[in-house]
Image: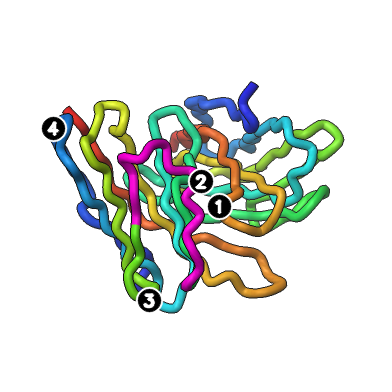
Amino acid sequence: QKEVEQDPGPLSVPEGAIVSLNCTYSNSAFQYFMWYRQYSRKGPELLMYTYSSGNKEDGRFTAQVDKSSKYISLFIRDSQPSDSATYLCAMSLDNYGQNFVFGPGTRLSVLP
Amino acid sequence: GAGVSQSPSNKVTEKGKDVELRCDPISGHTALYWYRQSLGQGLEFLIYFQGNSAPDKSGLPSDRFSAERTGGSVSTLTIQRTQQEDSAVYLCASSHLPSGSYNEQFFGPGTRLTVL
């Protein structure tokens, strides 16, 4: 079993849809949970991070962590064609970058 | 302001050749990371530099891989005797590790390496 699992997609949705992206993990000691967005031929950029459990909202994006189920989600409301990208989840025991474990990413296409 | 830059953006080489990939981090960032991203795989950590400390090389897949960081700034990742399985996108990231705050890494656009 991989340490972090993520549905690779691709996922296609119509503009305006609510998108749900998910990751599961096996290491219950993870404390930091991140979502990155990666456009084609670009490096990943941090969208959101959450420490421990709970929800975090930033504009159209909501990150949710359920540590009891070892499951994290990213919700995108009112999706736009500009949201078309690959979304990577990442998690870590600590705040040291070399310990981040990344999922393989989900490719999302938002169709106008 | 300038972000993390990497060169070349694309590199095609023949099996057995050596390659050098360059990373220019954001000015003032003390931490620098190299990752490898293969198709369908998550980012794989390779090596980490922090200031003048000895680098964390725990992610390097073999002794054909090495990296150095000169003057606490520019870094070069070298792959000797390249193999076809080395084909991937090599990403560099930097951060400034503010105490008590989240360690946000800023990524470069990557170097796409193809080994024929």
- Callout 3 secondary element: loop
Q: Which mark is residue B14?
A: 4
Decide whether the magenta segment is chiefly helix, strand or loop: loop
Q: Which residues are magenta?
A: B52-67
Residue holding disc 1: A98
Residue at horizontal 62%, vertical 36%? A19
In magenta segment, residue B95: no
Is the same chain shared between marks 4 and 2?
A: yes
Q: Residues within 10 Å of mark 1 (few under 14, many from 20)?
A: many
Which is in the foreground here, disc 1 or disc 3? Answer: 1
Q: Which residue is mark 2?
A: B58
Q: Amino acid at mark 3?
A: Gly
Mark 4 and mark 1: Cα distance apart in space: 30 Å
Residue named by callout 3:
B1
Spatial CA distance of label 1 from label 3 is 25 Å
The answer, for residue B9, to whether it is visible in the render is yes
User: In which quadrant of the rendered view does residue B72 lie?
Assistant: bottom left
Badges 2 and 1: C-beta atoms under 8 Å apart? yes
